[in-house]
Amino acid sequence: MQMASDSPHCHPPHCGQGGGEGGGYCVISKFSLPLFSELTLWEGAVSSRHSSLQSLPSLPSRPSGEALLPVMGPCGGALHPLSLLVQAAVVAVALAQGALPAFLPCELQRHGLVNCNWLFLKSVPRFSAAAPRGNVTSLSLYSNRIHHLHDSDFVHLSNLRSLNLKWNCPPASLSPMHFPCHMTIEPHTFLAVPTLEELNLSYNSITTVPALPSSLMSLSLSRTNILVLDPANFAGLHALRFLFLDGNCYYKNPCPQALQVAPGALLGLGNLTHLSLKYNNLTMVPRGLPPSLEYLLLSYNHIITLAPEDLANLTALRVLDVGGNCRRCDHARNPCMECPKKSPNLHSDTFSHLSHLEGLVLKDNSLHTLNPSWFHGLGNLRVLDLSENFLYDCITKTTAFQGLAQLRRLNLSFNYHKKVSFAHLHLAPSFRSLLSLQQLDMHGIFFRSLSETTLQSLVHLPMLQRLHLQMNFINQAQLSIFGAFPGLQYVDLSDNRISGATELVAATGEADGGERVWLPSRDLAPGPLDTLRTKGFMPSCKTLNFTLDLSRNNLVMIQQEMFARLSRLQCLLLSRNSISQAVNGSQFVPLTSLRVLDLSHNKLDLYHGRSFTELPRLEALDLSYNSQPFSMQGVGHNLSFVAQLPTLRYLSLAHNDIHSRVSQQLCSASLWALDFSGNALSRMWAEGDLYLHFFRGLRRLVQLDLSQNRLHTLLPRTLDNLPKSLRLLRLRDNYLAFFNWSSLVFLPRLEALDLAGNQLKALSNGSLPNGTQLQRLDLSSNSISFVASSFFALATRLRELNLSANALKTVEPSWFGSLAGALKVLDVTGNPLHCACGATFVDFLLEVQAAVPGLPSHVKCGSPGQLQGRSIFAQDLRLCLDEALSWDCFGLTLLTVALGLAVPMLHHLCGWDLWYCFHLALAWLPRWGRRQAADALLYDAFVVFDKTQSAVADWVYNELRVRLEERRGRRALRLCLEERDWLPGKTLFENLWASVYSSRKTLFVLAHTDRVSGLLRASFLLAQQRLLEDRKDVVVLVILRPNTHRSRYVRLRQRLCRQSVLFWPHQPSGQRSFWAQLGTALTRDNHHFYNRNFCQGPTTAE
C-alpha cells in the first residue's frame, strides 16, 4: 500500500457529474482519490451476489480508458474478488444501521431547502439519484467558490423554485482580498430549470444578464459588473415582478461609466412591480419604465433634476425613493460628492399625478425648503422621509403638511444647522393638519430646551404614538408635557444632556430666534442600539402603553417633580446615566402605573429598606451594572425592599460584583425571574452559612441566572437551599470542574440547566438522577472528553442536549440508552471527533440525524491528520480499510524480514563488536530511566523547614501552602509536606529520600542561614547527591529574615544563581512580586537561572 502523497503516479480525482466539492462519486483515473467514497463503487462487483445493494444509485457511463475501481481509505487500489465479497457483506450490515444524509455535503432543511452555504464548493454538487431530489424547492449556494455554471448543473432538480448563488465570484473591488474573478454561465444553465421563480446572482462578476426561464418572478443582479440593460436582456420574462440592480457602479464597485438603461429596456416586463436601481451613478430616471411599477428605488445616484415627464406613466407607483441624489456631505458616512448650488431641481408638479403614492423618500437631498405643491395630489401618502436635509428653519414655518391628512410616519431627523445648537424649537402650525400621524422622528436637530411650546402643534394629534427626540443636546426638558398627549406610547429622549427637573419658561419666536451655540464639527451618525438587557430575561416595553426613554443622559438625581402628570407611564428607561443617590421610596411617587423600570449602568446606593415601594404596580426592575457602591469597602447594602414589592416578577442584580455586607436573604412572594450573574457568589458562600439561604426566601422563583459568579464548586447543600420552584438554572461561565449530578434531586421541578463555559473534564461521577424533570441541558464550551455509559439514560424527559465545543472524540449510543430516539436536539459540533475506520459514532449520528444540527457540514473530524477539519462524511468511515492497522502490519512484516536477514549476517561479521556496544548501552539505561521518570514526578516541590520554629511553620502552612496550592487556580502547584504527605510506617530516611527524589524542586524555608537542624542538613545533602547523580540542581532557598547574617554558601549561590535565592519582603507592596518569582523558580529548571559570566551550570547528560 502506498500513500497518495508519496506516489508520483497518484493524481487528483477526475470527477464526473457527481464530482466536485459536493459530488457523490469520482471516476478513478489510474490511482486517483475520491472526495466522497460512495457505496455505488461496489455495485458492479457485488450486485450479482447481494441484492441488498441493488437499490443503490447507478453510475453514469464512464469515459473510455478509465476504470471504475473500489476506493478504500485515502488511496484506492484493486482488490481480490474474494476480498470484495467479504467487504460487501460488511457493507450490507453497516447500511442496515443508517443511511448517509441524502444531500451531502449540504444539509436538507425545512420546506425543501438544501443549504450549501459556506462550504467552499468549486462546482455545483450533483446529488445522488437515491436522494429525494424532487422535493428540493430551494437551493442556497451562498458564499462558495463556484466560478463556472454548466448547462447540466440544475437539470436533476425538477421542482427547483428558488436558487441563491450570491457571493461566489465577487468583483475584485468587493472581494475581501481584491482577487480578480470572472463567472462563466453557459447559455442553458437556467433555461434547464423551467420551474425557477427566484434567482439571486448578486455579488458575482458577470457582465451580461444570462438567459433566464420565463417562469422567473424575482431576479437580483446587485453588485455585479452589468452596466448595460437593453430589451433583449429581459425578453420573455413576462412573470417577473421583482428586479434588483443595486450597486453596479458606485465607490465600492467602481466602473468606467454609469449604468446605461436603454429607453424601453424594461417596458416589456408587464408585471414588474418592484424595481431597485440604487447606487448606479444614474443622472436621470430611465425612460420607458413599465407602468405596472409600484416600488421604484433610485436612491444614491446623481439625479438632481426631477420633472413630471420623468415619472409620467408610473401612475400605479406606491413607494418612490429618490434619497441621497444631492447629498449633504457634512453628515455623510461614506465618500460623498457635494450637491451643486441651487440643486436639486424638483418641479412643482413632479409627484402630483402619483395619486396612489404611499411612501416618499427625499432624505439626504440638501433641501432647504419644502414646496407645498410637491405634495398636492398625494392624499394617500403615509410615509414621508425628509431626514438629513437643511430644513431646520423650514419646519418652524412651512405649510407643506396641510394636505397630508393620511400621513402616518414623518422623519425629520438630522435637519440641523451646521455647528449650531438652537436654544428653542417651535414646530410650524401646519403640523396640526397631520391628523393620522403615528410616528414623528426629530432626532439630531439640536435644540437645547424642550418645553410645552416646542410641541404645541402636536398636542391635539389623536393618532400620535411614537416621538423620537434623541440626540438633540437637550439639557432642559419639561417631561410633564407628555401627559397632555392622550395616545402617546413611546417617547425617546436618550442621548441628550438632561440633568434633572427644570422649571422652564415658555419661549416664543422662531427656532433661530434664541441663543445659538456653535458646535465643533463631528460625526453625527447615531450610535449603536442599546443592548442592556440580558437576552430573553427582562421583559420588553414594546407591548406596554407608554414608554419614556431617558437613557444616556446626565441625570445625577431623580426627583419626583420630573414626572409630574405622567401617572400613565408604564415603562421608564434610565440606564447609562450617573444616578448616584440613595433611593428611599420617594423618587417615583407620581408614577403610579409604572410596570418596568430600568436603572442599569448607574451608581445607585441601595441603603434604604423602602426603595421603590412607591411603585405599587412595578413588575420588572433592572439594577444591573450598578457596581460602584458595592465595591466600596465597609459599606452595607439593604435588599429587603424586594419583599415589599408585591407585584415584582423580574429583578436583575447582574454585574454588580456583590460579595459581602448585603442582606443575608432575599425574600419575595411574587418574584418569578432573578438575574444574579456577574457577582461573587463564590465569596458569599465561602463565608460559612451566612449567605447559604440567600435565595431560599424566593418561594415562587422559576428562573435564576448565576452565570459569571466565579464558582469553583457547587455543594449539594447549596443546591438544596435554592428555591424548589426553579425550572431554569443558568451557571454559565464559572469555573466548575466538578458537578454532583445526584444533587439535582434537590431541584424537583428543574427543566433547564445551563453549564456552558465551565471547566468540566468528564461526565463520569454518577449519572443524571432517575425521575429528574430535566428537558434541556447545555454543556457546551467545556473540556469534556469522556462520558460514562448510561449517563443520560435515566433522564427520560431530556429533549435538548448541547455538547458542542468540547473535547469529545466519539459519541456513543451507550450514553443515552433508550433516550436517544426521543432527543429533539443533540448538538455535537465543535468536537475533535476521531474519524477512524469503522467509527461507531457515524452510525449512531445517522440514526438520530434529524436531531443533530449541522450534521452534514458542521460536525467535523479532529483526527487523523488528513481528515482534520473536514466533515465526518468526507469519506465513508464504514467502508474504508483501517489504514493505521495496515501500516502497522506492513511495518511489522518489514521489520521481521529485515531482522531475519540482518541478525545472522551481523553476528557472523561483527558479533564481538555488537556485544561490546550492547553492554556499553546497557550501562546508560539506569540514568536514561531516571530521566524519563522525571516527567512523571508526584510533586512540584518538597518543602523543608524547621518545625520547632513556630513562626516559620505558621508561614509555611498559612501563607506558602495557601498561595501555591489554593489561589493559583489551574496553575496550582503540588507541594510535599512532612506532616501531611509522609507515609506512616516508613523510616525518616525513606520518607526523606522519597520526598527529594519525587519532587521537581526542594524548597528550603529558613529563618536564618548560620545554623540549621539535622533534617534540613540531611535534605540538603540528598539534594546535592541528586545534583551529582542526575545533574539536576533542585535547590531553592527562601529566607524569611533578609537582614540576618548570610552564610558563605548563600552568598555564593546568590552570585551564581540569583533567582533560586528569594527573600521574604516585609513591605506588603513587594509580596506580589515575591510570589511571582517563587512560582517561576519552582516551575523552571535552575540551569536557566545561572549567571553565564561565572559558569554554565549543570547540563543534562545526553
Image (cartoon, grey):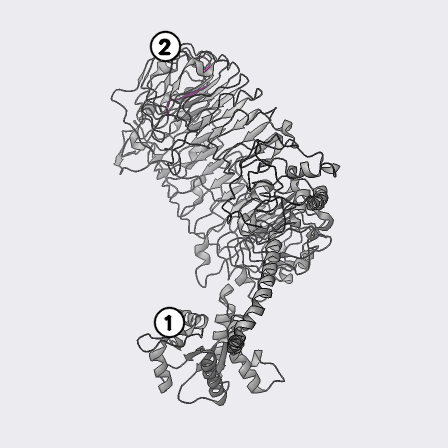
Rendered residue at 56%/36% (across/down): 22
Residue kind at label 1, given as amino acid type? Gly
Q: How far apart are marks 2 and 1 (CA)?
A: 84 Å
Q: Residues within 10 Å of mark 1 (few under 14, many from 20)?
A: few
Question: Relative to 324, is 557 above or below?
Answer: below
Please determine whether, in this image, residue 730 is positioned above or below residue 357.
below
Would residue 240 be seen by someone viewing this image from the given angle?
yes
Q: What element carries label 2?
A: helix
Establish if 514 lies above or below 615: above
Q: What's the magenta region?
A: 353-364
Asked whether the beta carbons under mark 2 and mark 1 sit within 8 Å of each other, the answer is no
Inspect the magenta stretch and tell me whether residue 358 lies in it: yes
- Image spot of residue 487 (x, y percent): 50, 28
Q: Main secondary structure of the magenta part?
A: loop
Q: How many marks?
A: 2
Q: Which amino acid does label 2 sit on?
A: Glu
Residue at the image position 51 percent from the left and 26 percent from the top: 150
Question: Is 17 a magenta residue?
Answer: no
Tell me where residue 669 appears, x and y as whole percent.
63, 50
Residue named by callout 1: 1070
What residue is pinned by disc 2? 309
In depth, the one of 95 and 767 nearer the eye is 95
Image quadrant occupied by the C terminus: bottom left
Relative depth, front residue between 474 and 452: 474
